[in-house]
Amino acid sequence: MEVTLMAKHRLVVMRIYGEIDHHMAGEIKKRVEREIKSTGAVNIALDFGGVTFMDSSGIGMIIGRYRTVRALGGSLIIFDASQQVLRLIEMAGINDLVLISDTLQHGINMMKSGKGARINA
Amino acid sequence: MRDRMKMTITSKPENERFARTVCAAFMLPLDPTVEEMDELKTAVSEAVTNSVIHAYDSNDGEIVIEGEIDGEWVTYMIRDSGCGIADIEKAREPLFSGSGDSERSGMGFSIMEAFSDEVSVESEVGSGTTVVLRKKISANA
């Protein structure tokens, strides 16, 4: 996992490698939450370009991070995800909660234009 | 064709990847599509994860995984000897999670059902749970 901070956008970007399952989801959660707390960022972007597999534990992890940014008034971006990952996200019905994009820049543009992800729960 | 395999793993999260990877490799002789492989790999991962999380209450136990190829059908049986499921119907409901962890999506059984042709669950409280996943892999010309 590689993490970079884009301070201008108050955005933590995390590149994830490998397979997101129950074991890995917990590690990602811990790392992202730590970065959000220590940097004061309110937005999260997860780079799925290196993800080769995901199961429902990944969905739980995504929903958890969505809750984190929503509480801070921020957004969650997921970019460069495979068809296998996108299919699960769609099955879970959370594709309206997260900003799904091909590239980080596109995701940031969506975030700036206020697209997606505003529900009053 | 016919083929069989059987393995036993300790119920540790680190072993979930090993289990689904072996199951995916086992079906290779049926020449599945990438999508079929992904589907069964995901379904197996859900079943194994359920056993890891629920069966032994964070103690180590054994999970037995068997695979069988019979003609165009591949079958996986994932069995633990853990606490069992009191209400299987409830456990199979979409978005139900028996875990207190808010990061469990409750999608496990829904995914197994969507990605397999047949799913059966047998469970007895105190003696364990067996999940059987079956899928037909049509020959890919």
Image (cartoon, grey):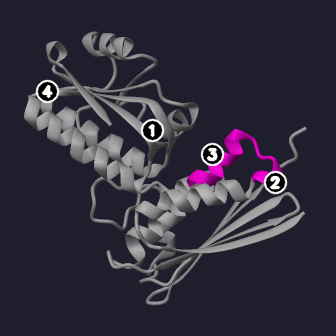
Residues tagged 1 and 3 counted as in contact (Cβ below 8 A):
no
Indicate left or right for B98 with A13 as reference: right
In reply to whether residue B126 is colored magenta, the answer given is no
Q: Chain of mark 2?
A: B
Nearer to the camera, A105 or B14: B14
Can you identify the residue that label 1 sits on? A93
Which kind of residue does numbered mark 2 sit on? Pro
Q: Percent x, y for residue A47? A: 38, 28
Q: Quadrant of residue B64?
A: bottom right
Label 3 SS? helix
Quadrant location, the C terminus of chain A: top left
Can you identify the residue that label 3 sits on? B38
Where B27 falls versus A121 (above or below)? below
Label 2 SS? helix
User: 10 Å neighbourhood of mark 2: few (<14), some, or many (≥20)?
Assistant: few
Q: Is residue B93 visible?
A: no
Which kind of residue does numbered mark 3 sit on? Asp
User: 10 Å neighbourhood of mark 3: few (<14), some, or many (≥20)?
Assistant: many
Can you identify the residue that label 4 sits on? A41
